[in-house]
């Protein structure tokens, strides 16, 4: 072996060692939490619109944990599109808990072998401490006279919704519209598809995420109606009280954001106890009220009633079970060549 | 080694080793994994994936907008480089630095800013809306974002060549009676053309894969303004790595071919010019 090859190899080996060295260094860093004496850190990987909710919740949880165990806890938040976040956790982003937009996304983490089967039953109410639904945000005075789903398929109405292919929230939008059409047309699927086609023909901009759609509608002034999470709609109203109105349709979908413990991570880091309490405490009266104040519907019916001035509690809500669960809905509607693709391809 | 390791610059073995490590860690291994993921599909499945109507439509949108944007950049980039090299004016250094901003700026920020400027309620969009032209949420909008992303590539490729270009050749041509257009065509252009082509190729490759800024301004409507990187993202959202990497390979191959041809042309030009 000549000198050139030898030193080249040496440098290559050095480079690789350096990189693996970094990796193992990061590993031992997180392991230091095992001692759990003074301070414990956990990571909550969540989706876009929960930013404000968890910023507030982490404070009350820190107080609660201090009282309970006399230990400080620091929660690191990560927000982004729900599907993307799930993908990152599945690929090794160390999250102690995930609080995502849909069961389907948590299932993706499960399928990567990080969450044990049966996580849905681990916490109350299918592991959904708070719910939301899909409503319409329209411009002040409701100039296009929009009251229900059949108003937004009319000609000349510009609709803004994110893309169901890339956004968890948008799948709820789509399914809510589908549920309305199904009721309207008595399960005649051809007519339902026709309705959906008209709806998406009215869509002006198909953003990749829910926050993007809100920006398009609110900041850039596109379209007449935004299909939005109820909590996002209320935030927009809060920021621009004189410019928008919320319209609750006759029928919508019960959007159940899911929370779960990432088993393999908490076992490795020794944080199972604090992570479990973190999710459990979401069901406490205090946290439920906090969810309500952030315009999420508390899953505790008594506390939900306290917010009857805010939320329309009379609208009829279908659930994902009416679609046979997420896996079935995904397969039928959003997979390649599924109904959503057909809607566009036949135009 | 024929020359028994005696080189002018010492440490060649070491630096070559570092180079090989970096190239394989950062370029070769990720690209190889792309191929591995794609290989989970049979050739027939790959073909079916990349020829789906919607995917083909997205190729059309992506290639068309990237090509037009790079063409605009090739022309505007040369003009910008020319001004920066040949003229002195106040705040020249500042302008020179600004050119690089698209490199440094998070692309999503650029996308959101451009969208709010060019939507029909935005500052610039309003003016165009009056003459019935929509920018944001159309292919024009995509092209605008790509022009923004690609401009530094051309400027930075052409600038050093112009700096080395000796003005005395132009003066000589002028004193021999050549017109300004003739001087540009026969003296300047042949010198800067290879660099312009390089800039064009780099910008084009970059534009093909650009996601962050474009998704905000594109409107993302299937068959109209849906770019290929968005399709790739949708596939990933469905946890369908194989289809995503199959589509990504097409973009990669196209970018590679373009850069390859640009290099080829450049090499030929250098030979003709005897350099």
Image (cartoon, rainbow, N blue to C red):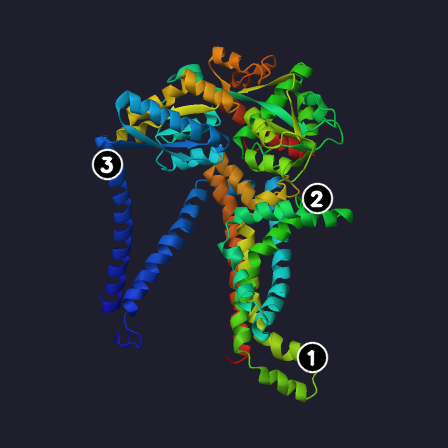
Estimate the x, y position of residue A230 in percent, counting from the top left.
57, 24
Q: Do callouts 3 and 1 point to residues on the same chain?
A: no
Q: Nearer the viewer, mark 1 or mark 2?
A: 2
Q: Residue furthest top?
A: A302
Q: Pick the residue in front: B79 or A112.
A: B79
- The mark tally for this picture is 3
Q: Tell me: A128 left or right of B192.
A: left
Q: Report if residue A127 is visible in the image.
A: no
Q: Residue furthest right?
A: B131
Q: Nearer the viewer, mark 3 or mark 1?
A: 3
Question: What residue sits 54% from the left and 33% below the top?
Answer: A167
Q: Tell me: A293 left or right of A197.
A: left
Q: Do callouts 3 and 2 point to residues on the same chain?
A: no
Q: Secondary structure at mark 2?
A: loop
Question: What residue sits 26% from the left and 40% below the top?
Answer: A29
Q: What subunit carries mark 2?
A: B
Estimate the x, y position of residue A140 in percent, counting from the top left.
70, 28
Q: Secondary structure at mark 3?
A: helix
Residue annotated with mark 1: B180
Question: What residue sits 26% from the left and 23% below the top?
Answer: A69
State the CA–CA distance, disc 3 to disc 2: 54 Å
State the CA–CA distance, disc 1 to disc 2: 41 Å
Residue annotated with mark 3: A32
Q: Report if residue B3 is visible in the image.
A: yes
Residue annotated with mark 2: B120
Q: Tell me: A165 left or right of B3.
A: right
Mark 3 surroundings: few (<14), some (14-19) or many (≥20) residues within 10 A: few
Whether A19 is drawn above or below A61: the answer is: below
Whether B189 is drawn above or below A117: the answer is: below
Quarter of the rendering containing residue A160? top right
């Amino acid at each position: 072996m000549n000198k050139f090859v030898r030193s080249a190899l040496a440098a290559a080996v050095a480079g690789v060692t350096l990189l693996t060295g970094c990796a193992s260094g990061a590993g031992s860093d997180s392991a230091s939490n095992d001692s759990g004496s003074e301070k414990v850190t956990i990571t909550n990987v969540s989706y876009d619109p929960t930013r404000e909710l968890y910023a507030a919740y982490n404070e009350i949880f820190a107080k609660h944990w201090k009282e309970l165990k006399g230990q400080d806890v620091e929660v690191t938040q990560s927000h982004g599109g729900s599907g993307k976040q799930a993908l990152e956790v599945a690929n090794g982003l160390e999250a102690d808990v995930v609080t995502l937009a849909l069961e389907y996304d948590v299932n993706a983490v499960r399928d990567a072998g990080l969450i044990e089967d049966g996580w849905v039953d681990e916490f109350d109410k299918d592991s959904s401490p708070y719910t939301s639904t899909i409503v319409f945000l329209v411009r002040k005075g409701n100039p296009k006279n929009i009251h229900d789903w059949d108003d937004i398929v009319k000609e000349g109405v510009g609709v803004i919704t994110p893309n169901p292919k890339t956004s968890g929230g948008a799948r709820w939008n789509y399914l809510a519209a589908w549920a309305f059409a199904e009721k309207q047309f008595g399960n005649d699927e051809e007519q339902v598809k026709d309705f959906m086609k008209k709806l998406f023909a009215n869509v002006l901009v198909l953003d990749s995420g829910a926050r993007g759609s809100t920006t398009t509608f609110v900041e850039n002034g596109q379209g007449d109606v935004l299909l939005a999470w109820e909590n996002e709609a209320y935030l927009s109203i809060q920021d621009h009280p004189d410019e928008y109105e919320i319209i609750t349709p006759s029928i919508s979908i019960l959007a159940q954001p899911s929370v779960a413990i990432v088993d393999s991570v908490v076992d490795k880091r020794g944080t199972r106890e604090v992570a479990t309490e973190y999710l459990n405490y979401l069901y406490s009266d205090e946290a439920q009220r906090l969810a309500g104040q952030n315009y999420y519907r508390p899953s505790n019916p008594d506390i939900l009633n306290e917010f009857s001035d805010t939320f329309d509690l009379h609208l009829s809500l279908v659930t994902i079970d009416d679609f046979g669960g997420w896996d079935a809905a995904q397969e039928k509607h959003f997979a390649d060549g599924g109904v959503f693709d057909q809607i566009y391809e036949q135009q | 080694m024929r020359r028994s390791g005696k080189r002018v610059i010492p440490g060649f073995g070491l630096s070559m080793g570092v180079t090989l490590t970096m190239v394989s860690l950062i370029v070769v291994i990720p690209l190889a994994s792309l191929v591995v993921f794609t290989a989970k599909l049979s050739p027939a499945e790959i073909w079916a994936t990349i020829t789906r109507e919607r995917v083909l439509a997205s190729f059309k949108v992506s290639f068309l907008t990237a090509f037009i944007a790079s063409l605009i950049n090739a022309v505007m980039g040369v003009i910008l480089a020319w001004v920066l090299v040949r003229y002195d004016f106040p705040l020249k250094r500042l302008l020179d630095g600004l050119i690089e901003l698209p490199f440094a700026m998070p692309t999503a920020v650029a996308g959101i800013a451009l969208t709010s400027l060019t939507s029909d309620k935005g500052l610039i969009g309003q003016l165009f809306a009056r003459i019935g032209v929509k920018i944001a949420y159309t292919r024009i909008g995509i092209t605008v974002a790509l022009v923004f992303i690609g401009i530094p590539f051309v400027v930075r490729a052409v600038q050093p060549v112009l700096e080395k270009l000796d003005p005395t050749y132009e003066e000589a041509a002028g004193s021999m009676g050549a017109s300004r257009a003739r001087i540009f065509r026969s003296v300047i252009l042949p010198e800067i053309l290879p660099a312009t082509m390089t800039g064009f190729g780099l910008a084009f490759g970059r534009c093909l894969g650009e996601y962050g800024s474009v998704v905000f301004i594109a409107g993302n409507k299937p068959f109209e303004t849906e770019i290929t990187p968005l399709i790739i993202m949708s596939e990933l959202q469905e946890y369908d790595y194989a289809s995503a990497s199959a589509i990504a390979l097409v973009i990669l191959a196209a970018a590679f071919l373009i850069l390859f041809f640009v290099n080829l042309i450049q090499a030929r030009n250098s030979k003709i010019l005897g350099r």
